[in-house]
Image (cartoon, rainbow, N blue to C red):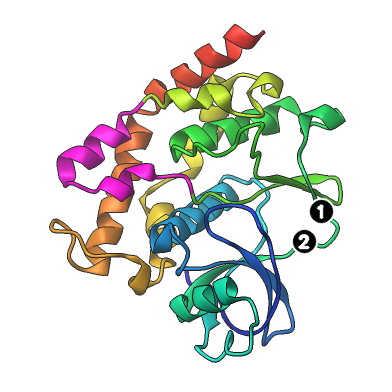
Amino acid sequence: MQLRTVTATRYVTPLREGGSLPAIVEADDLGLYVVKFRGAGQGVLALTADLIGCELARALGLLVPDVVCVDVDPALGRNEPDYEIRELLQKSTGINLGIDYLPGSFMFDAAARLFPDAAAAADIVWLDAFITNVDRTARNPNLLWWHRKLYCIDHGAALYFHYNWTGFGAIHEAALSPFAPIRQHVLLPHASSIVDAAARLTPRINPDVLTGILDAVPDEWLLPEPDAPTPQEKRALYVEFFLRRLESASIFTEEAERARTQLI
């Protein structure tokens, strides 16, 4: 698969939240996008994780805003009066990640007593255990209500093993993680069986799906590693991680189900 590329034409307003210092940006297709910048502290690895997480969620039938690549020209921030924003834009020349802006959406809040159905909640919990996403908590749910439907956003904290990429062994070890942080998932108290969710979702993931998603990651985001010096070799290792994790899905599925039943 290939993502559509748009060119940023106007920096609209910053969203002062998250380590990626996102902002609403207008593009040459006249669309508005929440853009995650490669020049932010977490760099292109956060963009890679976010893109993969979004497209995996979509492949599983979950709702996710449209994703595009956003080309940032060096001239974009030239007249920006805020030094921090101007510096960020200068460091972000090239391809960045854009998420379709959903006007009128609002963040999920359990206190509002508005929840998805239990099966949908279980599916999101299973996805986050699969991709080791630590950032879907009550403090930072990264879920948006839009037109009474729940959308998953911001998967940049997932796949945290790639911040300490030390070779094949580390990748295989990460794939076998039970992922204990799933206990903090904001939807876990509202989910039905995670085992049933696994049965629904695992058939939707296969090598072709994974390869297609990894093909969408821009080459310039795939930083070289000793065991994966080219973008294509690194894509292959991400696919290998996911296939190994899928083979051992019972490990993290049972961990999530244990955590869920302890809340009942």
Left or right placement of residue 67 versus residue 210 in this view = right
Q: Amino acid at mark 1?
A: Ser
- Residue at the extreme left of the image, as rendered: 226
Q: Which residue is mark 2?
A: 102
Left or right placement of residue 156 versus residue 121 in this view = left
Q: Main secondary structure of the magenta part?
A: helix
Q: Say which of 239 and 161 sits in front.
A: 161
Q: Position of residue 9 (x, y in %)?
A: 65, 87
Left or right placement of residue 186 versus residue 157 in this view = right
Quadrant in which the C terminus appears: top right
Disc ID at residue 3: none
Disc ID at residue 105: 1
| Mark 1: secondary structure | loop
* Quarter location, residue 135: top right
* Residue 161 belongs to the span the image colors magenta: yes
Left or right placement of residue 82 versus residue 259 in this view = right
Q: In the figure, 35 relative to 108: above or below? A: below
> At 27% across and 68% down in the image, what residue appears?
231
> At 43% across and 57% down in the image, what residue appears?
42
Q: Position of residue 235 (x, y in %)?
A: 30, 60
Tag 2 and tag 1, C-beta contact below 8 Å: yes
Residue segment shown in magenta? 157-177
Q: Say which of 255 and 117 sits in front.
A: 255
